Image (cartoon, rainbow, N blue to C red):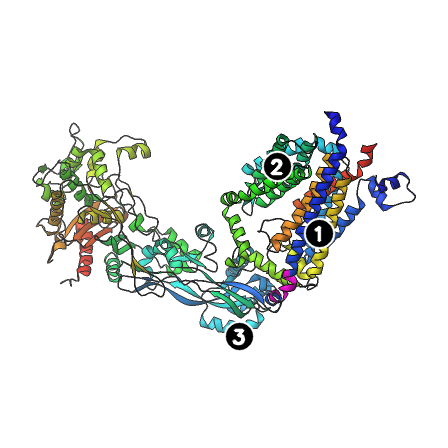
Amino acid sequence: MSDTLIDWKNPPRFSLTKALRVIHIDALLLFGLFILLGLGLMVLYSAGDQSTALISRQLVRLGMAFFVLLVLANIHPDRMRDSAYILFGVGLILLVAVLFVGHEGKGAQRWLDLGFFRFQPSELMKLAVPLLVARYLAEYPLPPTIWRLIIGLVMIIMPSLLIAKQPDLGTALLIASSGLIVVFLSGISWRIIIGFIVSSTAALPVLWYVMHDYQRQRVLTLINPESDPLGAGYHIIQSKIAIGSGGLFGRGWLEGTQSNLAFLPERSTDFIFAVIAEEFGLVGVGLLLVLYLLVAARGIYIASQAQTSFARLLAGSISLTFLVYVFVNVGMVTGLLPVVGVPLPLISYGGTSMVTLLAGFGILMSIHTHRRMMSS
Amino acid sequence: MLRFELKDHHRENRVINDRLIFAAIFAGILFAVVMIRLTVLQVFEYEHFNALSDRNRVDFEPLVPQRGLIYDRNGVVLAENIPVFSLELVPEKVIDVDITLQELQLLLALTDDEVAEIQQQIKHQRRFKEVVVRQRLTEQEVAKFSVNRHRFPGLEVVGRLIRHYPHGALFAHTIGYVGRINEKDQQRIDEKNYKGTQYIGKTGVERFYEDSLHGQVGYQQVETNVQGRMVREITNTPSVSGQDLFLHLDINLQRVAAQALSEFNGSIIALDPRTGGVLAMISKPDFNPNEFITGISRKSYAVLRDSMDRPLFDRALRGHYPPGSTLKPFIALAGLEMGIVNESSSTFCPGWYSLPGKEDHRYRCWKKQGHGKVDFITSMAQSCDVYFYDLANTMGIDRLHGFLDLFGFGRRTGIDVPSESRGLSPSRQWKRNARNQVWYPGETLISGIGQGFNQMTPIQLAHATATLAMRGESISPRVVRATRDTGQTELKLLPIERLETLPIIDSRNWQATVDAMVEVVHGKRGTARKVGKDLTFKVAGKTGTAQVFSIKQDEEYDAETLDKRLHDHALFIAFAPVEDPEFVVVVIAENGGGGSKTAAPIARKMIDQYFGIIPNE
């Protein structure tokens, strides 16, 4: 079935790829991640006023994240499936807890202070939701019955609503989409999918009604950023100037004036894509997007080669959600989507999202590298 | 079932793989959209964005609206904006803040404390936000800095308009003052509209009418060069200046009030009862509001704050005073209305009163030897306490409290100046809630002469007197008469705030009460007969002397031996002309002794000023 597996049976000589296989690391995926992360550090150095302290903090976080990746890659996918309910349950309890005792940051309650470090329960849910939905749907023949589909949707909606209440609409939508991708992959009929799209479009006015004022402001600002140049529109205006002035080839590394002269807000976190666009131009961001697509393609390949439906659904969801993150961030920075605080995966400065992302890749590697043992 | 499931494993794989391919294609399309968007921005609109970014930088600058001015009723400016130069530093643009501050210290002779304070501010503010190094530069300092300015990148002399109160302390409490926006103020403002604004109304009219006075922020989209200097203006949305305010206050009357009360602490309020317009309102002692604008020094503030006389305290709206005998007209009207007394009922005053069965406890009349036989008119004119003890006793505290409530005692008048106090009109219920005690009949007697628990603010007393003058029409007092939008010439008059019309059944009761008050001023033996001297029109008034220090049963009040702070408060309320009232005045002179001796003559000065009478001495 797979050519790599035959090589493994008769190793002719030392190969790094095979050495990595022993510790359940997928070499191609790791290679892609390294390129993206290296690029990220380079850009961060420029966006963060060339501060080495910032880079070293990010490196420490990366070390932690890779540790988590390594641990997860060495856990058998079946064990992950076994712990799906527990992880989901713990995540749900923490989400409720955060509403009551959470710490506020930027006007929203997202953090739980555990004394030695601060933890965002929504990050746990980013993995727990697709994990549980994949397990639940894959237990019985696919495509799922209507009844199982409804239960699966409840599993998605519950944590999403809790996170939307913090309020963190961006993360809530991302988590919902990670679960919905599992549902989509499970092969539900197109009639249901189209019906869902039509009804959720119809529900948009309701969403408008329940949104916070600042969220509505962001949508309005998207339509016309110049209406509020001092307030919410400032981010988008400055980010568009940074991107547009990058041109075809960019101004060069460390040469971005918008970024270095502090015209661009949040330039080392959510708006770091604009820095890349300014310094490396259309060619640079084009290559970056291709890199993202390649990493995701490897993930999708892993999903297609997985041996259980559970593993296929989970791997497919993790890979596609990764692309959704990229799209939402880039869409926001280029003014295609409203400003929702979503970092650019693997590049933005920040700890928690990095750990979750690499944990996801750890799961992908586990699914890919544990195949043989399963088939035997 | 289980077998069937295993059998279909291949079909499941195919389903999922089909969906994976579909999703991958869909993701590819989304990324293509992003690439198109990026191509539009970076290739087709490159010139546009490059122009904005490279050659020049686009900047948005808020255009701060000019704060509205405040005028008195004659058009005299009471609050204006004057240009002041200050030296400001933007931390982000300064290469080395510490060295810069050291050099500035030499140049401008900054004290170590000032430098420390600036450093503190730099630490606590965002780095692109300006920090004031020195406020109100002298011309010499401006020149000194200008010569050396090449040495100080990131520092600039900025000309700003700053609030100024040309009449200093005269309107300190009523108009109030503006000050720097602090964290607490942030809560109540629209951050966007206050971009660039540094000052906000802190007290008085300045605070109450903040929204009108502030105006609407504008903004300017400018291209700046690398040094951040403006090169070209792209768009300009002008700011809208705040509204000018025109007050009911009359500066001349205000001055007379301040002079007349000069030696006492206390308050004077003059109202036009027909509109509720506040013609004069002072609270003594006062302070210079100009000191507060750019930040008062800690030392000066401590002096004001810790002074025994509490100059920062607005007595006119927040001072609690026992009304003393000035409450008697209202109680007399209650007696008439309830049918307890009529114009001819009389009582014998032996100089004291006692409750039946408790003859050993004597409630004294202010006149030790007694007034003898007093009727409705003479009891008011001579302020006989015994008559009112008897009246209050028959009425009972419940009815007494209910009637005083109609006149707004114990309630806020709703004047357009913030932080008004409620005062206290005692009742059985209040005493149970506040002190967990029952109401004693003796306390009703004391309440009947405006002593005991009664605590009224001067504005309440003025409002109640105005309601009396208007024969029951209650109008909320107003300081601001009209507003004027920028660039307009005509004034927009603010509406008169009519509250209610008092439910008095017999309108003759008004006349009887007013007649009795006229007797106070014009009667041969009236306690304020000096006020009525040589007047061509009739004034209705009532004196009051409020005890600060309670005298025991067998003691005498002796002003000579008593500490000044324990002397009685002198009060006087009046309105004129009696038949068609247009002027109400309330005088409270703390520790002024007697109402007729101290407060009434002050009120006469106010009447003289208002009606244009030249006093012949």
* A368 shown above or below B221: above
Residue A304: name its quadrant. Answer: top right
Which residue is farthest right? Answer: A12
Q: Give the distance between the C-alpha atoms of the residues marked 3 and 2, in whole angstroms.
A: 68 Å
Q: Magenta residues, as a range?
A: B40-49
Q: Quick one: A178 or B417, which is closer to the camera?
A: A178
Q: Residue at x 73, y 28 (%)?
A: B5
Q: Is residue A73 left or right of residue B91?
A: right
Q: Give the residue type that dot 3 points to.
A: Val
* B129 shown above or below A24: below
User: What residue does disc 2 label?
Assistant: A156
Verify whether residue B42 appears in magenta. Answer: yes
Residue A160: percent from left, percent from top: 59, 39
Q: Quick one: B141 or B502, which is closer to the camera?
A: B502
On whether disc 2 and disc 1 are found on a single subunit, the reply is yes
Q: Give the residue type that dot 2 points to.
A: Ile
Q: Residue at x 63, y 42 (%)?
A: A177
On whether disc 3 and disc 2 are found on a single subunit, the reply is no
Q: Chain of mark 1?
A: A
User: What residue does disc 3 label?
Assistant: B147
Around disc 2, counting alpha carbons within 10 Å, would you say few (fewer than 14), some (14 to 19), or many (20 or more)? many
Q: Nearer the viewer, mark 2 or mark 1?
A: 2
Q: Where, quadrant-wise, is the N terminus of chain B in this rendering? A: top right
Q: Quick one: A259 or A163, which is closer to the camera?
A: A163
Q: Is residue B373 left or right of residue A250?
A: left
User: What residue does disc 1 label?
Assistant: A56
